[in-house]
Image: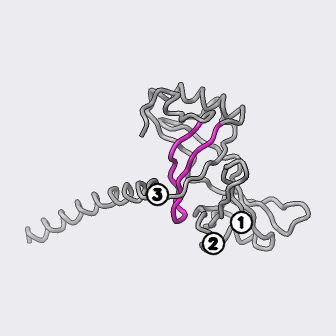
Amino acid sequence: MKKFYLILLLLIVFIQLAVPVRMIINREKVLRDGERFSFKTRPIDPADPFQGRFVRLQIQQAYCTIPEAEAEDFRGKQKIYAAIEVDEEGYARFTDGHRKIPDTSAYLKTRTRGGYTAIKDSPNCEIRLQIPFNRFYMEEEKAPRAEIIAAEASRRGDCWVDVRILNGRAVIEDVYVEGESIRRLSGAPPQ
């Protein structure tokens, strides 16, 4: 009987170690093999851009379009695949929303935030997305300087986040202010 409990204990320990290791491996795979997209950020609330050890990011264009006839199907927090395209300035934006994985290789698997807005003179509407890459973690002692830098750059419209996306999963690579990494500008070491 003791042998059974020992095996059970070892199995539980293995599972507890395997889960975070798998999460780390998946994150690193997205960073290594994922396609890079740059998303413009909008002004950050200067009163509370940090909660703990991360910079809160607000993506300028956090919505995609769907046919208005399907809008009711996406009420609440429904799963959606948002196709991504890059504009002429080199920044990514979400285009069409889909219930299933789209034919394009560039898409984000996320959820809707409920509500939609009709587009004038169009059979489509815009639906808001939950952006899974809205926190950029850094060292806590570097946060105050990064907060000031990011807030000022966002107001000028010169702040963006580089995100790697692979098979619908997204991982933040870095945040840039006026073309330079916020880690470097705030004195934090690169990851």
Q: Check disc 3 and report its element: helix, strand or loop.
A: helix
Q: Is residue 65 magenta?
A: no
> Which part of the image, by quadrant, shows the N terminus?
bottom left
Across and down, in percent, residue 43 comes to: 69, 36
Answer with mark 3 or mark 1, whichever residue precedes in sequence.
Answer: 3
Amino acid beneath label 3: Val
CB within 8 Å, label 1 to label 2: yes
Return the residue at label 2.
Answer: 102
Residue lying at 64% horizontally and 31% vertically, measured from the top left: 151
Return the residue at label 1.
Answer: 96
Q: Check disc 2 and report its element: helix, strand or loop.
A: loop
Q: In which quarter of the image is residue 32?
A: bottom left
Residue lying at 53% horizontally and 26% vertically, measured from the top left: 144
Residue lying at 89% horizontally and 60% vertically, measured from the top left: 120
Q: Check disc 1 and report its element: helix, strand or loop.
A: strand
Across and down, in percent, residue 97 comes to: 69, 66
Q: In this view, does 70 lie above or below 39?
A: below
Answer with mark 3 or mark 2, whichever residue precedes in sequence.
Answer: 3
Q: Which mark is residue 30?
A: 3
Report how far apart the C-alphas of labels 3 and 1 lie in the structure.
Answer: 22 Å
> Which part of the image, by quadrant, shows the C terminus?
top left
Task: Give the crowd class for mark 1: few <14, some 14-19, many >=20 residues within 10 Å.
Answer: many
Across and down, in percent, residue 11 comes to: 21, 66
The residue lying toward the viewer, choosing from 154 and 158, is 158
Q: In this view, does 3 lie to the left or right of 155?
A: left
Magenta span of residues: 159-176
Answer with mark 1 or mark 2, whichever residue precedes in sequence.
Answer: 1
Amino acid beneath label 2: Pro
Amino acid beneath label 1: Asp
